[in-house]
Image: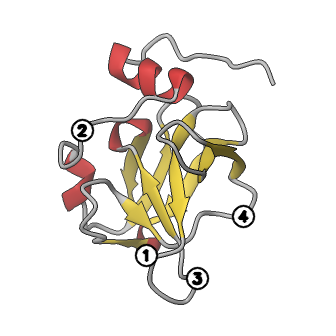
Amino acid sequence: MVKKINQNLTPEQKLILFEEGTELAGTSELNHEKREGSFHCANCGVKLFESKTKYESGSGWPSFYESLPDAFETKTDHHIGYARTEYHCKNCGGHHGHIFDDGPQPTGKRYCNNGVCLIFKPKS
């Protein structure tokens, strides 16, 4: 996939989305976002999550128990010494975070997302 990088991204967004970086835990304003709406890829704008799937995981990053269907592609990374499932926007290839098996029901999943990679759009 050819990655099309939005030229309006900040250097931090580019680092995380296209060099698989990570923002510092607890720094995203989206950790506290409770309004009804949806979360979109900061690079390409594709809708990734509905607000009803967001929950407080205590991890320091915005967390969701379910993504929209067909929103992401996954791969295994070993960057910190053990296998983790990394997920990328299927539309633009931007890295968003990792999926863990410690989330709430009904899925038991935790999509641990870098907040700077998301744009929240409140329901109008």
Distance (Cα) linking label 4 and label 2: 28 Å
In this figure, which residue is indicated by the disc labeled 3? 107
Quarter holding residue 54 = bottom left
Q: Name the residue under label 1.
A: 52
Secondary-structure class at tag 1: helix
Q: Which amino acid does label 1 sit on?
A: Lys
Give the image location of residue 33, x and y in percent.
24, 60
| CB under 8 Å between discs 3 and 2 | no
Looking at the picture, how far across and down is residue 49, in whole percent?
A: 52, 60
Task: Tell me the residue at 54%/17% (across/down).
Answer: 6
Q: Pick whichever of labels 2 and 1 is earlier in the sequence.
A: 2
Residue at the location (58% across, 82% down)?
107
Q: Distance between the residues labelled 3 and 4?
A: 13 Å
> Of all residues shown, which one is farthest toward the front?
81
Mark 1 packing: few (<14 Cα in 10 Å), some, or many (20+)?
some
Q: Mark 2 points at which residue?
A: 24
- Front residue of this view, candidates 107 and 41: 107
Q: Considering depth in this image, is 60 or 79 the residue closer to the camera? A: 79
Residue 124 in sight from this viewpoint: no
Can the viewer see residue 4 in this picture? yes
Q: Position of residue 83 (x, y in %)?
A: 60, 51
The reply to whether dot 3 and dot 4 touch (C-beta < 8 Å) is: no
Q: In which quarter of the image is the N terminus?
A: top right
Foreground tag (1 vs 3) = 3
Q: Mark 4 points at which residue?
A: 69
Residue at the bottom extreme? Answer: 106
